[in-house]
Image (cartoon, rainbow, N blue to C red):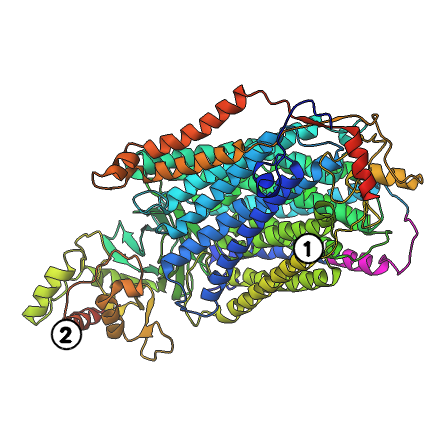
C-alpha cells in the first residue's frame, strides 16, 4: 500500500518528486548537523573561562552565500514541481479512450459508478489495466478524501456540485488498498476500500456479470426477509439506491470495507465472508460506530440465512 | 506617603484578580497556559495509548475524535499562545525599558477573556461532549447536520471569546513597542525577542479577525439557521477552508516567531557573543511574517483549486525557506567563535536548531503540491507540524522559561533537574514524532481512531507511544523543578547568568512594580552588555529620580470576561427544549445571553465614566525599596 512502492505512473511521478526533495533536504540537514556539531564541540566554554569572544556583527559574504544557495535549491525543486502540477491536472473527463468513473463518498463507504457502462458498485473499484481511469469525485455528505497510496495521491471529495477530477493508470494487476484521508466522523479510520486491477477480458466479463439479474434466495421466508429488511435501502444489481449496492458482495475482499474476508483469519477483523457478514448485520454499530446502517430486528438464524445468501452472491470474472 | 489620589492597593488573591501589572499578568498567563498545556498533554497521551496497538478500543471512536479535536485546539489556542503571551508580558516591557505596557487595563482584559474562553471550551467535556470535528472544524462535518449536540458550539463560542483576548493583547504589544521604548532604543536596537513579539503582534492583528469572521459565520450557521457553510442550502464548505487557513497559516508564524526570538536571545547570551547578522535577522523575521499571509492554500492542495493556484502556492511556500535558512545559519554562526555555556536554557536552544531544521525541510517537501497529494492528511503531516510546533515552539518556550525564570520569579530553576527535563523531553520528542514520518509515507492517514493489523504500522506506533510517555516524564520533571525551586530563597541577582545583554538584566530579579526606577538611556544594540563592557554596572539613567505614575488595579476585566462567559452559554443553549418552565423562558428568549452581554457592557460603561487617574509611587518609596534590596 505504501507511497514508497508506487505501482502506477501517477504515484511514480509523485514518488520521483518526493525522492528529489528528500535527497536535497537530507543534504541540507547534514550540512546543518555538521556545522552545529562542530560548533558545539569546538566552541564550548572551558571551566573558568572568562574571556570575551570577538563581537562579530555579521559577514556579508557568508550571508549572501546562505541566501543564494537555498534559492538555487528551491529552483531545482520548483521547476519539476510546477511541471508535475500541470501534468497531473490534465483533464481526461472528455477523453473517449479513458474509463470514466464517478466516485461518491458517503459516511462511511464509497460508491463507484461507471456512467458509460451503466454499472454501479460499492467499496471495490474494479478497473482494467490498459487504460487511463478518469475520476470525478464528490461527496454525498461531509468532506472525505480519496486516496490509494500506491496508485495516486489524494483528492478531496467536496459537497454541493463541487466536483474534483483526477486520473490514474494502473498497469499492474492486483488489489490496492485505499483510504479515506479527511476526518469525516467516528468511523473515519474504518473507511477503507479496494482498487482491483484486472486485465481487459476479465474486466469485460465483470461488467457483463454486473448486469446479469440475480436469483433471489430459494427459501421464500429468507427472500421475504431480504426484501423487507435489506432491499428497502440496498440494491442488488442495476436498480439505484442510496446505500451500498450488494451486487457481488460475496466476491469482495471485505465486508463494510473493514472486515477482511479470508479463510485463514489471523487478526481480530478477519474471518470468512459469512462470518464477517453475520458480524456486520448482527450489530453494525459495533463494527463501524456512527454508520447509518441500523441494527435490524433479526433472530440469529435469520442473520445467518441472509449472510449465507449474500456470501453466495459471487461474480465470475 | 504623599499619594496624589487615594487608590486601593489589594493584596493576596484580590491582588491577582485585579492586577494590571504586566509582570503579574505574565505569571497569570503562564499558570493558565501551563494548566491547559497539561490538559492538552493528557489528551495526547490518551490518543497515544489508543494507538499503541492495532484495533485497540481504549477509547470509543467518538471520544477519540473529541480528544484529537481538543488536543489540537487546546494546545494551539490555550497553551502555546498564552505561554507566548506570558513571556511577552513578562519580558518585552523590560527589554524596551518601559514601566508597563501601553494599555495595562486592556492587558488584563486580554488575559481574562482568554481564560474565560478556554474554560468555556473545556466545560464542554462535562456538558455532554466536546467538539469533535478537528481543530480545523471543517464544514460540513462541523454543521448541525453532521455534528448535533453542543460540542462544536463550544468551539465557535469559546474561541471567539478567547480570540478577543489574543487580539487585544496583540494590539497592546504593537502600541507598547511602537510608543514606549526608552530613549535611544531605536527600532534597529531592539532585542530580537522584542522584534519577534512585534511582528507576531502584527500578524495577530491581521490574522485573528479572519478567524473571528469565520467563527461568527459558523455560529450563525449553528445557532441562528444561517447557511454560510451548508452546501444543501447553497452554502460553500470550501469557503470555510479558505477563511480558516487565511487565519491558520499566519497563526503558525504567530507561534514560531517568538520562539525564534527566544532562541536568538539565549544563544547569543550563552555564547557571550553578539547575535550574528542582526539586521538580516530582523529582515528575515519581517519577510517570514509577510510571506506567511501568502501561502494559506498550501493546506488545501487536495481541495481541487486547480493547477494554477497549486503551482503558485507551492512556489510561494518554498520561498519561506530562504529567510528561515538565514536565521538558522545566523544562529550557528552566533555560536561560531563564541564561548558556549550549556545551561538548560541553552540546551533547549541548541536542541531547537537541528530539530527545527528537520521540521523545516519537511515543510519544503510538503510545499511541492504533487508530492503533497501523497503526504497530505497522513501521519507525515502530523510529524511535520509537531516538529515545528513542539520541536520548534515548545523547545523555544522551555528555553525561554528556564532563561527568564529568575527575572519572573527571582529564583533560578535547578540546573540538574533542568538537564534531566531537557534530555527526557528531547529524546521522547524525537522518538514520538520521527517515526511518524514513515507511518505517513507507508499510508497511515492522520486522525485515525485505530488501524488494522498486518499493515506494518504496529511497531512504529508503539515506539511513538513510548516516546510520548517520555515527553510526559520530561514535563513532570519540569513541574517538580518549579515546585522545588519555589521553596528556595528568592536570591537571584540582577544578572544571574552573568552574561545578560539586554535591559531586563540591568534591574532586580524579579523586577519591581515600576520596573525601572529611572528610565534607562540606550546607547546601542545589546544596551546592557555595552555598558558592562565599558566597566559600568548599571544603565545610564535618562531622567532624574521622580515620582512614578502607576495604573490602578481593577476588577472590571475579570467581570467583563465572566459576562462574556455567561452570554456564550446563553446563546449556545438558546435553542434547547426546556418545556415551558422558567428555564425555557430564560434560555429560549436569549435572556441569559443578554444578561451576560449587559454585564460586559456595564463594565465598559463604568470604565468610561469613572475617572481613574491611577496613583504615584514617590521617590522615597523607591529608594526605600532599594535599601531593602541592598
Report whether A122 appears left or right of A222.
right
- Would you name the residue on which mark 1 appears? B486
Which residue is at a point 29% across and 54% down the rendered structure image?
A111
Which residue is the site of mark 2?
Answer: A301
Which marked residue is nearer to the observer: mark 2 or mark 1? 1
State whether residue A180 appears in this view.
no
Residue drawn at x 89%, y 37% is B531
Name which quarter of the figure residue B93 lies in: top right
| In the foreground, A100 or B626 | B626
Q: In this picture, which residue range is highlighted in magenta?
A: A33-53
Q: Position of residue A4 (x, y in %)?
A: 53, 62
Residue A47 in the magenta stretch? The answer is yes
Does the image show residue B41?
yes
Query: For residue B427: magenta?
Result: no
Mark identifier at residue B447: none
Residue at the image point whose x is 61% and y is 51% from the top: B388
Amino acid at each position: 500500500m505504501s507511497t514508497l512502492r508506487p505501482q502506477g505512473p501517477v504515484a511514480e511521478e509523485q514518488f520521483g518528486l518526493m525522492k528529489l526533495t528528500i535527497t536535497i533536504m537530507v543534504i541540507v540537514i547534514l550540512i546543518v548537523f555538521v556545522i552545529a556539531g562542530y560548533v558545539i564541540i569546538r566552541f564550548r566554554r572551558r571551566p573558568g573561562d572568562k574571556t570575551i569572544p570577538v563581537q562579530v556583527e555579521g559577514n556579508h559574504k557568508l550571508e549572501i552565500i546562505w541566501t543564494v544557495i537555498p534559492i538555487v535549491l528551491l529552483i531545482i525543486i520548483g521547476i519539476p514541481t510546477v511541471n508535475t502540477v500541470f501534468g497531473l491536472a490534465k483533464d481526461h473527463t472528455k477523453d473517449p479512450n479513458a474509463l470514466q468513473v464517478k466516485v461518491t463518498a458517503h459516511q462511511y463507504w464509497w460508491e463507484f459508478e461507471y456512467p458509460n457502462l451503466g454499472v454501479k458498485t460499492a467499496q471495490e473499484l474494479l478497473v482494467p489495466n490498459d487504460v487511463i481511469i478518469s475520476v470525478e469525485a464528490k461527496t454525498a455528505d461531509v468532506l472525505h478524501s480519496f486516496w490509494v497510496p500506491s496508485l495516486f495521491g489524494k483528492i478531496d471529495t467536496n459537497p454541493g456540485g463541487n466536483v474534483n477530477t483526477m486520473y490514474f493508470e494502473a498497469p499492474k494487476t492486483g488489489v490496492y488498498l485505499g483510504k479515506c484521508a479527511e476526518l469525516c466522523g467516528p468511523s473515519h479510520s474504518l473507511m477503507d476500500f479496494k482498487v482491483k486491477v484486472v486485465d481487459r477480458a476479465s474486466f469485460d466479463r465483470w461488467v457483463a456479470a454486473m448486469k446479469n439479474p440475480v436469483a433471489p434466495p430459494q427459501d421464500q421466508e429468507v427472500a421475504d426477509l431480504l426484501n423487507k429488511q435489506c432491499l428497502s435501502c440496498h440494491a442488488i444489481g442495476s436498480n439505484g439506491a442510496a446505500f451500498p449496492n450488494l451486487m457481488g458482495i460475496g466476491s469482495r475482499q471485505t465486508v463494510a470495507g473493514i472486515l477482511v474476508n479470508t479463510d485463514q483469519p489471523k487478526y481480530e477483523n478477519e474471518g470468512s465472508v459469512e462470518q464477517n457478514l453475520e458480524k456486520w448485520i448482527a450489530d453494525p454499530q459495533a463494527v463501524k460506530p456512527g454508520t447509518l446502517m441500523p441494527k435490524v430486528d433479526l433472530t440469529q438464524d435469520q442473520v445467518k440465512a441472509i449472510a449465507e445468501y449474500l456470501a453466495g452472491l459471487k461474480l465470475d470474472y | 506617603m504623599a499619594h496624589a489620589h487615594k487608590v486601593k492597593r489589594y493584596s493576596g488573591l484580590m491582588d491577582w484578580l485585579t492586577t494590571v501589572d504586566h509582570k503579574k499578568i505574565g505569571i497569570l498567563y503562564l499558570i493558565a497556559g501551563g494548566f491547559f498545556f497539561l490538559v492538552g498533554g493528557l489528551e495526547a497521551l490518551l490518543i497515544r495509548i489508543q494507538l499503541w496497538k492495532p484495533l485497540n478500543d481504549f477509547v470509543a471512536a467518538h471520544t477519540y475524535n473529541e480528544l484529537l479535536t481538543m488536543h489540537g485546539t487546546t494546545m494551539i489556542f490555550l497553551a502555546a499562545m498564552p505561554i507566548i503571551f506570558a513571556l511577552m508580558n513578562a519580558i518585552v516591557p523590560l527589554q524596551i525599558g518601559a514601566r508597563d505596557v501601553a494599555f495595562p487595563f486592556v492587558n488584563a482584559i486580554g488575559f481574562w477573556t482568554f481564560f474565560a474562553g478556554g474554560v468555556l471550551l473545556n466545560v464542554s467535556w462535562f456538558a455532554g461532549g466536546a467538539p469533535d470535528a478537528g481543530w480545523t472544524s471543517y464544514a460540513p462535518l462541523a454543521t448541525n447536520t453532521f455534528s448535533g449536540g453542543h460540542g462544536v458550539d463550544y468551539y465557535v463560542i469559546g474561541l471567539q471569546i478567547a480570540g478577543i483576548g489574543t487580539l487585544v493583547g496583540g494590539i497592546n504589544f504593537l502600541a507598547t513597542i511602537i510608543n514606549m521604548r526608552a530613549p535611544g532604543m531605536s527600532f534597529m536596537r531592539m532585542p530580537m525577542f522584542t522584534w519577534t513579539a512585534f511582528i507576531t503582534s502584527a500578524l495577530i492583528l491581521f490574522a485573528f479577525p479572519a478567524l473571528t469572521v469565520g467563527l461568527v459565520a459558523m455560529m450563525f450557521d449553528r445557532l441562528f439557521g444561517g447557511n454560510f457553510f451548508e452546501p444543501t442550502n447553497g452554502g460553500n464548505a470550501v469557503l470555510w477552508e479558505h477563511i480558516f487557513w487565511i487565519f491558520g497559516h499566519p497563526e503558525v508564524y504567530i507561534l514560531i516567531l517568538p520562539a525564534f526570538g527566544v532562541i536568538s536571545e539565549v544563544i547569543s547570551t550563552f555564547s557571550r557573543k553578539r547575535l550574528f547578522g542582526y539586521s538580516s535577522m530582523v529582515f528575515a523575521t519581517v519577510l517570514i511574517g509577510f510571506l506567511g499571509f501568502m501561502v494559506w492554500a498550501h493546506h488545501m492542495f487536495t481541495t481541487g483549486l486547480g493547477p494554477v493556484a497549486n503551482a503558485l502556492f507551492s512556489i510561494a511556500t518554498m520561498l519561506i525557506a530562504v529567510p528561515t535558512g538565514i536565521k538558522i545559519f545566523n544562529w550557528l554562526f552566533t555560536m561560531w567563535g563564541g564561548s558556549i555555556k550549556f545551561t538548560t536554557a541553552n540546551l533547549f536552544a541548541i536542541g531547537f536548531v537541528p530539530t527545527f531544521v528537520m521540521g523545516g525541510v519537511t515543510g519544503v517537501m510538503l510545499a511541492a503540491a504533487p508530492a503533497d497529494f501523497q503526504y497530505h492528511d497522513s501521519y507525515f503531516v502530523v510529524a511535520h507540524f509537531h516538529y515545528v510546533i513542539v520541536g520548534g515552539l515548545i523547545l523555544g518556550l522551555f528555553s525561554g522559561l528556564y532563561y527568564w525564570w529568575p527575572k519572573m520569579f527571582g529564583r533560578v530553576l535547578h540546573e540538574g533537574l533542568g538537564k534531566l527535563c531537557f534530555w527526557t523531553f528531547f529524546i521522547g520528542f524525537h522518538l514520538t514524532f520521527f517515526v511518524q514520518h514513515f507511518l505517513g509515507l507507508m499510508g497511515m492517514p492522520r486522525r485515525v481512531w485505530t488501524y488494522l493489523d498486518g499493515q506494518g504500522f504496529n511497531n512504529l506506533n508503539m515506539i511513538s507511544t513510548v516516546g510520548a510517555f517520555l515527553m510526559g516524564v520530561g514535563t513532570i520533571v519540569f513541574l517538580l523543578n518549579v515546585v522545588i525551586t519555589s521553596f528556595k530563597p528568592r536570591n537571584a541577582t540582577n544578572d544571574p547568568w552573568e552574561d545578560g545583554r539586554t535591559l531586563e538584566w540591568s534591574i532586580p530579579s524579579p523586577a519591581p512594580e515600576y520596573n525601572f526606577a529611572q528610565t534607562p538611556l540606550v546607547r546601542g544594540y545589546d544596551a546592557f552588555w555595552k555598558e558592562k563592557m565599558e566597566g559600568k554596572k548599571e544603565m545610564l539613567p535618562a531622567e532624574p529620580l521622580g515620582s512614578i505614575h502607576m495604573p490602578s488595579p481593577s476588577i472590571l476585566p475579570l467581570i467583563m470576561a465572566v459576562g462574556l462567559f455567561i452570554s456564550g452559554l446563553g446563546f449556545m443553549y438558546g435553542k434547547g427544549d426546556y418545556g415551558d418552565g422558567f428555564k425555557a423562558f430564560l434560555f429560549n428568549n436569549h435572556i441569559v445571553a443578554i444578561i451576560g452581554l449587559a454585564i460586559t457592557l456595564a463594565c465598559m460603561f463604568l470604565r468610561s465614566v469613572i475617572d481613574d487617574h491611577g496613583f504615584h509611587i514617590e521617590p522615597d518609596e523607591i529608594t526605600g525599596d532599594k535599601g531593602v534590596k541592598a
